Image (cartoon, helix red, strand yellow):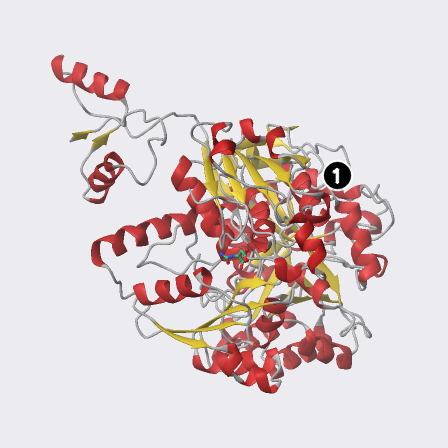
Amino acid sequence: MYINLPSKNHYRRPASYASKGYHTRRMAIDYAVPLITNVKNAKMLAEALVRKSSLDVSSIDSKNSYLTYSFPGLVNIAAFVPNLTAAGNQEWSNVTEASVAAGFTTAIILPIGSDNMVSDRRTFEQVRSNISSSAHCNYALGVTATAANAQALNDEIYLQTKALFIPAHTPLSAVAAHFTAWPLEKTIITNAKGSDLASILLLASLHSRSIHVTDVQTNDDLLLITLSKAKHLKVTCDVSVYSLFYSREVFPSTTALPTMAEQKALWQHLDKIDAFSVGTTPSRLAIDTGKVFSPTAGLEEILPLLLTAVIEGRLSIEDIRTRLHDNPVHIFNVPEQTNTHVEVVLGRKVPFRSRTGSWSPLGSQLVAGVIHRVMVQNQTVYVDGTILSSPVGRDISATIVSHVLPKEIVAEPLPAVAAASQLSSSQPQSLQAPQTGHISMSSTPHPSFHRRHILSVRQLTHRDLHDLFSLAHEMRLQVERNGVLDILKGKVLCTAFYEPSTRTSSSFEAAMKRCGGEVVPITIDKSSVVKGESLPDTIRTLSCYGDAIVLRHPDIGSAQTAAKFSSVPVINAGDGIGEHPTQALLDVYTIRSELGTVNGRTITLLGDLKNGRTVHSLVTLLCLYSVRLNFVAPPSLAMPHAVVSAARKAGISITICESLDEVLSQTDVLYVTRVQKERFENEQEWLHVRDAYRVDHAVLSRAKEDMIVMHPLPRVNGTSDM
Ligand code: NCD
């Protein structure tokens, strides 16, 4: 047993990674020595020893008389919002509020239905403005493939969406054009059926594309999907939960449901179904049976229906978790939400009661499972019928999707005949839940980083940062102990810097070498770029030689372009005045290491906020924390409007001013940037602002004693030699 009470240090919090105390506490954990770090606990232990009390500690914290279970935040993979593109549509808020209350903390919006097509920039912007600041859960947008828009879905739309939806009956020539144009990292989803589905699966196979089929109802479609999986095609599918519980025999006026025989087949072959969805089935059922139609239809019934099936022995809790969380997270590359879960109570029979009072096929039937509480990032957003959520949902559309589906979801290759005969086997073959979460140097790959392009910080979540920083810390300790590791032995990194760089280029090179890998650096001014070679051609070539490519380039969006032409991950090391994701990750890691925590801090960004790409990425990352931000710059170098409004939307309190003195005394981190001469069109303008700010001893004497000063470097103006 080791008792080590962290001392209160003026400059560093106890968790600071730099102190000797931290290192010895860390050793206790590494070597599994029981450790007490809290003075009250140490006193209680001493008291217990003196009194010779029994030291048995129960592992149970509390008890109740029902079965309870805690799911991670669920994913609604086919969320339906009626009149999605209608100007000023307010349904979004209701639908996402109902989602949260139903346990869905992430929704993927499918533009299903001819009135709902998001097929061009106008409809896309309309949807974004309808959604703006009104989503209660995290959301991602899908766009609609039409016969004519394969080329029109330009790069920016691609980037800001999660998936391409190919509606049933889309002409095959258009489907083929979309398969060619749509980026490999983003999902394609279709609701095609029968021979349409067969044609799309064939085209997907010819284009080596992965595809998700939503709302499967018939045994024939399921057979097609199983045969495709057997042929190595990366196809996944979902079934609307209503299709598992309601049939046309019970509701003869609708075509939205399967027949009883089809439903029976769905249950028999549940092992072939990767995910459960809500989709349009509940709304179509309400409309077809002449009931008052609610846009939130079906959401609140999903868990009670599925949990009742668990009590009846028809499903397992794992079946639900796999199909409403694990597989959707992988198929759509949904970021994991930290401290987010859905607590359910099973086995207590209660009459179903619709919270919204709208019609439900469940009526007031008894159900054997209800949601007790939904927590999002440690906040209770729903508890026993009461919604406490606010519209703080984030747009996660930009998360980059890898075209490589996890092995667990792609069925093992089987001879086609064997696969077909499996459809009549009653032996369940459930999909393995892939591991997510903490990255360790030796364990399973992390879904947000493994084989992913790192193009923008917008693709990362708070959980990703937490996992990455834990790994970085572990690696830092290992490098301190051993100098060089061998975790990247045999791997080659190609670096292409089209703009000057000292730190970024050498830090990538050093990191690669410290991890046992090799680097092939391209010297751009001695490369074929001088002969006029295009970026796509350079990238195509490098991706044949390396396992990853680091790119710095003067054009905004260049990393995205490179990603389209690369068969290996591309890491954006600065794209013009756009982003600099890895510098921002390092900056957040530094703040965390120096101050112990990012939350609660006031961070002041000073200097060229217009052109400084590091601050653009840093602000986006800081929005994942609870911070206050000050932007101090002359008006001509102010932070771009898009960055400011995204931060405000994320609920960050922002002060914009010209004078550092206005905010200095409140500042915990002063982040200084260089006035970027090379981005100015005329030198006079640069001369006018280049000495706008200077951080020297006089400035520091007016600052908080423990304020830290950061700079991405190079410092050529603005800071005196300190
Ligand atoms: C910066 C960059 O190139 O964006 N430096 C860096 O990469 N660490 C900042 C700058 O050039 O001023």
Between residue 493 and residue 575, name the one nearer to us: 575
Residue at the spot 86% in from the left edge and 50% down from the top edge: 86
Seen in the image, is 236 located left or right of residue 176?
left
Q: Would you say residue 103 is visible in this rendering?
A: yes
Q: In the image, residue 611 lies at what x, y percent?
A: 64, 54
Name the residue carrying label 1: 94
Q: Residue at left 25%, top 62%?
A: 484
Q: Residues within 10 Å of mark 1 (few under 14, many from 20)?
A: some
Residue at the top extreme?
51
Q: Secondary structure at mark 1?
A: helix
Depicted 651 relative to depicted 535: above or below: above
Task: State the image coordinates of residue 191 (x, y, percent, origin top left).
Answer: 71, 65
Quarter of the image where the N terminus is located = top left
Based on the displayed image, in which of its 4 quarters is residue 394 positioned?
Answer: top right
Q: Quadrant of residue 439?
A: bottom left
Q: Position of residue 252 (x, y in %)?
A: 79, 55
Where residue 687 sits: x, y (%)? 66, 53
- Residue 54, compared with residue 457, is above or below; it is above
Could you tell me the amino acid type at mark 1? Asn
Q: Is residue 34 above or below residue 582?
A: above
Front in this rendered view, residue 378 or 659: 659
Ligand 1 is within 8 Å of the C-beta of the residue at disc 1: no
Up/down of 96 relative to 122, above or below: above
Q: Nearer the viewer, residue 107 or 247?
A: 107
Q: How many marks?
A: 1
Residue 360 seen in the figure: no
The C terminus, quarter of image: top left
Q: Quadrant of residue 680?
A: bottom right
